[in-house]
Amino acid sequence: MAAQGNGQTPVLAVSHLETVFATPEGEVKAVNDVSFSVNAGEAVGVVGESGSGKSQIFMSVMGILATNGQARGSVKFKGTELLDLERSELNRIRGVRMCMIFQDPMTSLNPYLTVSRQMTEVLTTHKGMSTADARKASIALLDRVQIPEAARRIDMYPHEFSGGMRQRVMIAMALLCQPELLIADEPTTALDVTVQAQILELVSGLRRDFNMALVLITHDMGVIAGMCERVMVMYAGRVVEAAPVSQVFHSPQHPYTVGLLRSMPRLDETAHGRLATIAGQPPNLQRLPAGCSFRDRCDRRIEVCAQEVPPLRPITPERSKACHLQAL
Amino acid sequence: MAVITQHGQIPDLEETQGRSLWQDAARRLRRNRASVASMIILATIALLAVFGPLLSPHPYDELAWDAMGVAPDFERSFWFGTDTLGRDLFVRTMYGARVSLMVGIIATFVSLLIGVAYGAIAGFVGGRVDAVMMRTVDILYSLPFLFFVILLMVIFGRNLFLIFVAIGAIQWLTMARIVRGQTLSLKRKEFIEAAHAAGVSPMTIIRRHIAPNVIGPVIVYATLTVPEVMLTESFLSFLGLGVQEPLTSWGALISDGVKNMETRPWMLLFPAAFLAVTLFCLNFIGDGLRDALDPKDR
Amino acid sequence: MLSYTLRRLLGAIPTLFLIITIAFFIMRLTPGGPFDRERPIPPEIEKNLLAAYDLDKPLLVQYFKYMGDILQGDFGPSFKIHDFSVAELIAINLPASIKLGGYALVLAVLIGIPLGSIAALRQNSWIDYTVMGVAMTGIAVPNFVIAPILTLVLGVYLGLLPVGTWGGGSLRNLVLPTIALALPQIAFIARLMRGSMVEVLRSNYIRTARAKGLTERIVLSRHAVKAALLPVVSYLGPAAAGLMTGSVVIETIFGIPGIGRYFVSSALNRDYTLVMGVVITYGAAVILFNLLVDLVYGFLDPKVRYD
C-alpha cells in the first residue's frame, strides 16, 4: 500500500511477509505475501474474518508466534529489520516503542500477579525506573484510563476487575512507555457493546494525546469507521483491498469488501427479512484453490480468476486492490 | 450485487470430512512415535508371555540339578540362564510376564469399576450425597492402604485372585476423584443444559454426552495405573507376600534376583529389564493418550 | 489465615477419630490374633494372656477403653515387641524416618522442579527426551532394585560411601538412602513439572509477557513458575506424608531405625496396638501435610483466599 509520502520512515514497513505454520496435516500459510506500511501518527484498520491472517501478521511483527510458526520476508520498525533480530534487541523495541494489546484481557493478564507488579515491571525493565517511581507513573496512567481509586486498585489481582476495566488496565500497561505504535488485536470483541464504545473512545483520545500510530485489528467494519484513517481488508491470508476509510465505505472495489459492508446491519434501514450474508465459507488454508482465493464465493468471477492469483495493484495513489475485475 | 444471497441459501459446500474426537485422537496418537513404538513393544511382550514358553524345551518348574545358577547357556537352551534351583529363567520370565500383566490389567479393571461407578454417582447426584461420598474418600486416603493389603494377604493367604482385588481396591480412590471431577464440570457445561432443556432423559444424557467425555481421562489414568499396580505387586513379592511358588511374577523373580545380584546378575537383569521396559511403554502410551485426547493441545 | 488453620485443625479431629475407628475395627475383625502360633498354647495360658491385654472383653468395650486411653496419650503396650509401649516405639523411631524423609523431600524438590522446567523449556528437544527418559527410570524400576544397585556401585565398587548402617544418622550414612528414597520422587516431580510448565507456557498471559519485551528469564521466573508449581504443590502433600512416615524397603535395605518397617511387621504379626499407633501416625501426617499444602496453595494462587 502506498505510504503517504512525506519523506519520513514509516513506523512499520511490512514487505512480502509470509507466515507459515507447520501442522501434522501439512503447512498452513496464514499470511501470504502481505505488504503495507504504517506512518507515524496514523490509524490503520485491518479487517477480516477469523482465519484471514489479520492477527498473525502482527504476531509475526511482535515475534510472538507459536513455536510451530515461522515468518519470512521483511518487517521493519522505523528502518530496523525485526525478523531474525536478536531477542535482546527485539526486547528493546517491543513493549517500549511498539506495544500490543490482546483480545481477551482475562487470559492475557497474569492471574497470579498483582496489576502493580505487571505494570511496574515494564517501567523498571525498559526505563530503569525505581519501583516507587514506576508505581507512581502506573497509578497516574490508570487514572488516565479512568480506573477509579487507582492507587488502591493497583494492588489488586486481575480477577478482581471487571472485563472492561481489565481491558483498560491492558491499555494502560501498553502505554506506560509512550510507544510510537500500538497494535490493538480485537480489543473490544470480548466486551459488552456499551463498554466497547467507551474503550474505543479511550484509545482514540490517548492516541491523539500520545501522537501514536495505531493498528486496529477487527472483524467489525463499524469499528473501523469511527477510528481509522486507512483500512486494509484481508482474506485467506492476503490483502484484497487497501484504501482510505471514507473511500472504501463510499466505493468498495473488491467483491469481498462489498459483501462485508452489505452484511453489516444498519440502524437507518428498516428491518426486512433475512440478514445479508456472503455465500459459502472461508477456504481451507491448507488447500487453497488455484487463482483467487475468493472466487468460489464471488458472483462476479471471470475465467482468469480460476487461473491467476490477482496481485495487489494500486488503482489510485492511495488505493490498491487485488482483483482481476477492472471495476465494480 | 449478486454476491449476496438474499435468501440465505447455503450452497453445497465441498464435503470436508468431519472428524469425530476419537478419529482425531487416533490420528494424533498414531503420530506420536514413542507411543506407537511402545504399543508394538508391549504387544510383542504380551505375545511372548503367551507363546514364549512354547519356544523353549524347558518347563517352568523343572529343577535341573546339574544346572543350578548357571549363566545363559545357548547349547542347553537356557537362554536367560537358570536360577539357584536350576529352573530356566527364560520360561519363568515368560510365566512371570503372564502373572504380572494379568495382575496389572485385572487390578486396574477392578479399580476402574469401583472408581468410575463411585465417582460418577457422586458427581452426577451432587449435593449432600456427593459431599458425604467425597469425605469418605478423603478419610480412606488417610489410611495407609498398602498396609491393609498386607493384612488381607496375611489373613486370606496368597491367593492370586485376592491380589487382584486387594490392589485394585487401593487404586480406585484417585479414579473416583477424577471421574467425579469430570462429571461435575461436565454437568455445568452449557451443552448439558441444552440437552436437558430439549427434554433428553438423564440416562440418555449420561450415555451420549457425559460418558464419552469422561472416558478420555479415565482411559489415560487407567493406562497410568497399570504400572503402579505392577510395582505394588512387585513390592508385595519383595515382602514375600506375592504369588505362591512355583507360580512366579516379575516382582518375585526380581526379588530373588536382587538377592543374587553380585554372583548371578542375569537373575536380576532379565526380569528387571522386562518389567522396566513394560512400565516405560505403559507410561509412554499413557502420555501419548493424554496428549491425543486433550483437545486444548493445539 | 490463622483462623482458617485453626478451623482446619479442629476439623481434623473428627477425621482422625474416624480413621482410628475404621482401623480399629478392621484390625479386630480380621481372623487370627496376636498370639496364634504354630503350636497351640495351652488354654489357661491363652486365657491369661488375653485377659492381660483386655482381649477377652467384648469388642465395643475394648474400643471405648482404647479411645479413652488414647485421649490420655496412652497407646498401649506393643503385643509383640515386649517391654516397650507403642508410644515409646513410635517416639524412638519416628525421628529417623522424618530426618530421612525430610532430606529426600528436599532433594526431590531441588532436583525435580528445575529438571522438569528445563525439559519444558526445550520441549521435544534431545534435552527433553533425555531428562524425561532418565526420569522414567525412577518410575519404572522398583526402589528395591535401585537401592541395592546404588549401594553396590557407589558403596562397594567405588567405595565412596558407607554401606548399610545408620551410623547414628550421620550425613555420610544418609547419602545413599536419601538418594534411593528420593529417586522415584524426583522422577515424578520432574514429569509433573514439565507437563505443567508446558501448559503454562502456552497461556495467553505468557504471550503478553513476551510482548512486553521482558527477558525470557523473567518471563519464566516471574510469570510462569508460580502457575506451573500449583499441581506440584498439590502432589507434594500426600508424597511428603508418605516420605516422612518411612519406606519399608529403604529402611530394611539400609538398616534405618525408622517406623516404616513397623508398617509391615506389625501387620504381619498382628500386633494390634502397634498397628493402631502406626495408622494414627500416618493419618495425622496426611492431615497435617494436606493442611500445609492448602496453605501454600493459598499463598501462590490469589484466587484462593482463606479468611
Image: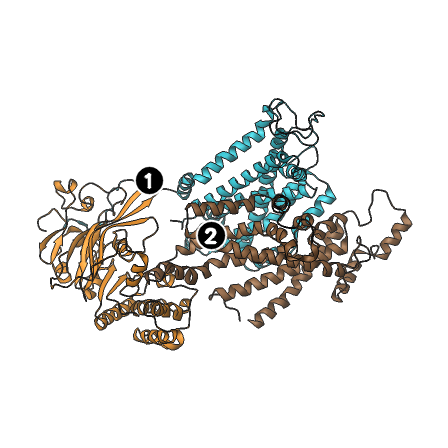
Chain colours: A orange, B cyan, C brown
Q: Tell me the chain of label 1.
A: B
Q: Quadrant of residue A11?
A: bottom left
Q: Is residue A264 visible?
A: no
Q: Quadrant of residue A12?
A: bottom left
- Mark 2 is surrounded, within 10 Å at the Cα level, by few (under 14), some (14 to 19) or many (20 or more) other residues, namely many
Relative to A6, is C223 on the left or the right?
right
Q: Is residue A319 visible?
A: yes
Counting from the top left corner in percent of width and height, residue C185 is at 56, 52
Q: Tell me the chain of label 2.
A: C
- Mark 1 is surrounded, within 10 Å at the Cα level, by few (under 14), some (14 to 19) or many (20 or more) other residues, namely few
Question: Residue at horizontal 14%, vertical 44%?
Answer: A301
**Observer-nearest of B138 and C219:** C219
Instruction: Give the label on residue C53, or none.
Output: none
Circle 1: residue type: Gln
**Observer-nearest of C75 and B238:** B238
Relative to A141, is A303 on the left or the right?
left
Residue mark closest to the camera, 1 vs 2: 2
- What residue is shown with label 1? B17
Question: Residue at horizontal 29%, vertical 69%?
Answer: A177
Q: Residue furthest front?
A: C159
Question: Residue at horizontal 11%, vertical 62%?
Answer: A5
Counting from the top left corner in percent of width and height, residue A226 is at 20, 66
Counting from the top left corner in percent of width and height, residue A78 is at 20, 61
- What residue is shown with label 2? C194
Q: Quadrant of the N terminus of chain A?
A: bottom left
Question: Mark 2 and mark 1 in contact (Cβ < 8 Å)?
Answer: no
Circle 2: residue type: Arg
Task: Respond whether the residues carrying marks 1 and 2 are from the same subunit.
Answer: no
Relative to B260, is C190 on the left or the right?
left
Helix, strand, or loop for circle 2? Answer: helix
